[in-house]
Amino acid sequence: MPDTSAAPLLVLVAMEEEAAPLTSRLTDPDVLATPFAAGVSAVRGRLAGVETVVVTTGIGVAAATAAATWGILTLSPGLVVAAGSCGGLAADVEVGTVIVGESFAWSIADATAFGYAPGQLPGGPERIVAEKAWTDRAERAARRDPAAAVRRGLMLSGDAFVTAPLADPMRERFPGALSTDMETAASARTAEALGMPFVALRAVSDLCGPAAGQQFHLELDVVAETSARAVEALAADLAG
């Protein structure tokens, strides 16, 4: 694992509500200028002593790709982190759980007619895989929060909100997938293409097709705070 202590931490979230508990933790926050017309903001400060830039990308694959590309090329971070909320896909996942991304795939990509795996884009990897050493470190950081459940595994992303009718077919296509959202795989693929280490620490806000008796929803600010605590713990670990 390379030494990233001199490079900033780049934290990507989709919405301002997800950014708020992170930017509120920054010391000496400073709003950075971005080249985007609207929907993207960046705030620099120090999180647990580590120089950090929190970028609000906007929602969706294209928005996440554009903002992640700008952030990586402009800031040369030592580590890219996807934070915020996600939908719980695994039948036994619970709201509030922190999902640590181990691998990533496109939830609605289907080129299986040409011999590709479900979720694989032609010419791309079957799975985008996070470096194990970084995933281990992120998981350890998330588990420092005694109030948070933590799961580690496959995260799906695509430009479709996964409602209950879509959940069961998606589980069949992706056995073991824990969560779904609209940005993480795009950010992971961008980081991989640009040679940057990447981890994801997103908390489950809603269940995609909950079972009877399961709590299926938590307010966005609650899970954003849970994710922010995990990111802060990771930053503290980086600070040594």
Image (cartoon, rainbow, N blue to C red):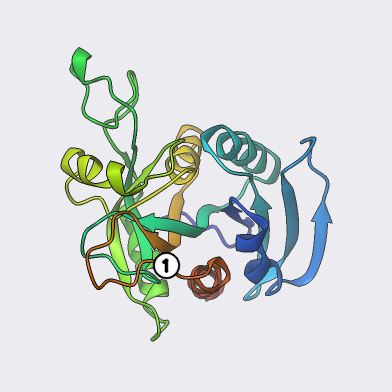
Residue sitting nearer the eye, 20 or 212: 212
Q: Which residue is drawn at 22% across and 67% down?
A: 212
**Farthest top residue?**
114
Which corner quadrant holds the N terminus?
bottom left
Residue 50 visible: no
Q: Horizontally, is 12 left or right of 136 in the view? A: right
Q: Horizontally, is 35 left or right of 12 in the view? A: right
Name the residue tied to disc 1: 217
Q: Horizontally, is 141 left or right of 166 in the view? A: right
Residue 84 visible: yes
Query: What percent of the width, then of the height, locates residue 148?
Result: 39, 78
Q: Horizontally, is 35 left or right of 90 in the view? A: right
Query: What percent of the width, then of the height, locates residue 56?
Result: 66, 51
Q: In this view, does 137 lie above or below 127?
A: below
Q: Is residue 104 above or below residue 3?
A: above
Disc 1 element: loop
Query: What percent of the width, then of the height, locates residue 83?
Result: 52, 59
What kind of residue is marked 1? His
Query: What percent of the width, then of the height, locates residue 69?
Result: 61, 36
Image quadrant assignment for residue 124? top left
